[in-house]
Image (cartoon, rainbow, N blue to C red):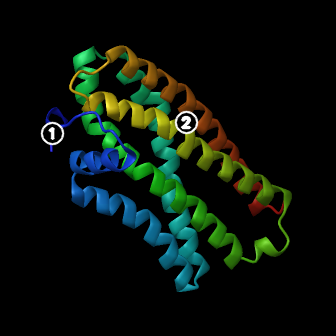
Amino acid sequence: MSLADAHRPTSRRERYSLMADAASRPFTVGAVAVPLLLPLLGYLSGDVRVMFTVHLFLGAFWFGTAVLGAVVLGPVMGSLSEEANVEFAEGFVPKMNLLMEPVSVGVVGSGVGLSAMMGLLASPSPSLWAALVLAVALLVLGFGPLHAFTSGMFDEIAAEETDHDRLASLNAKYGMLSMVELVLMVAIVATMSGIRWGF
C-alpha cells in the first residue's frame, strides 16, 4: 500500500494497521514474530549456547541499527528536501517502528533468560544489576519518547497535507534521542564485559 492513499490515523489501532499495510503484512508478521519467538525457543531448548547465540544475534542487530539510525540515517534525512524526506520516511518509518520494538523486547528477554539459565540471577553481580537497569532504561526510551516521535512522523507522512516543519522537528528530536540510546547501548555492552570477567 502506498501512503499516498492513506490518511492521518485517528487512533493507535488505525496507526498500526496503516503501518502494517505500508510495510507489507508479511514483513509485519516476521518483524513481530521472529524477535519474540527466538528467545522463547532458545529458552525452551535448555541449551545455554543456543540462548547465547539468540541474544548475541538480536543484540547485534539492535545495536547496529541504533548506530545506523543515530549516525547515518538521521543526519541524511535532515539534509533532504521536504519531498525527498517524505518519500524516504514513507518506506523507512513504518518498517522501523514495527521491527525495532519487538527486537528490543527480544534482546532484553533473551538476556534475562540467558542470565537465568547461567544461574546469574541467584546472586546478581553489580555488572548484572547495571545491565538490568540499562535494559529497563532502553525499553522506557524506546516505548516512550522514541515511539512517540516515530509515531508522530508516521502520522505526518500519512496525512493528506504533511506538516513538513513538524516532520523535520520530530526527525531532529528522534536523532538526538537516538544518540542517547546509543550511549546507553555502549554502556550496556561495557556491563557485558563486567559480567564476563566476574564484576
Percent x, y for residue 186? 65, 42
Q: In the rendering, which numbered label is found on residue 145?
A: 2
In the image, residue 8 lies at what x, y percent?
A: 28, 33
Mark toward the start of the polypeptide (2 vs 1): 1
Q: Is residue 166 visible?
A: yes
Name the residue located 22 percent from the left edge and 45 percent from the top edge.
22
Above or below, 100 relative to 157: below
Vertical placement of 69 versus 14: above or below?
A: above
Q: Position of residue 105 (x, y in %)?
A: 53, 58
Q: Position of residue 120 (x, y in %)?
A: 77, 72
Write the residue at 22% across / 18% down: 83
Residue 50, relative to residue 124: is it above or below? below
Quadrant of the image occupied by residue 78: top left
**Image quadrant in which you'd find residue 166:** top left
Residue 110: name its quadrant.
bottom right
Report whether 105 appears left or right of 37.
right
- For mark 1, give the secondary structure: loop
Image quadrant in which the C terminus is located? bottom right
Residue 2's mark? 1
Image-based side of 28 in relation to 122, left or right: left
Front-lying residue, 94 or 8? 8
Disc 2/disc 1 C-alpha distance (Å) = 26 Å
Q: Residues within 10 Å of mark 2 (few under 14, many from 20)?
A: some
Instruction: Judge by depth and name the residue closer to the eye, 43 or 8.
Output: 8
- Disc 2 on helix, strand or loop? helix
Q: Nearer the viewer, residue 195 or 22?
A: 22
Mark 1 is surrounded, within 10 Å at the Cα level, by few (under 14), some (14 to 19) or many (20 or more) other residues, namely few
Quadrant that contains the N terminus: top left
Q: Which residue sits at x=74%, y=51%?
A: 133
Q: Amino acid at mark 1?
A: Ser
User: Which residue lies at the image location 70% right of the left edge and 48% below the top edge?
Assistant: 134
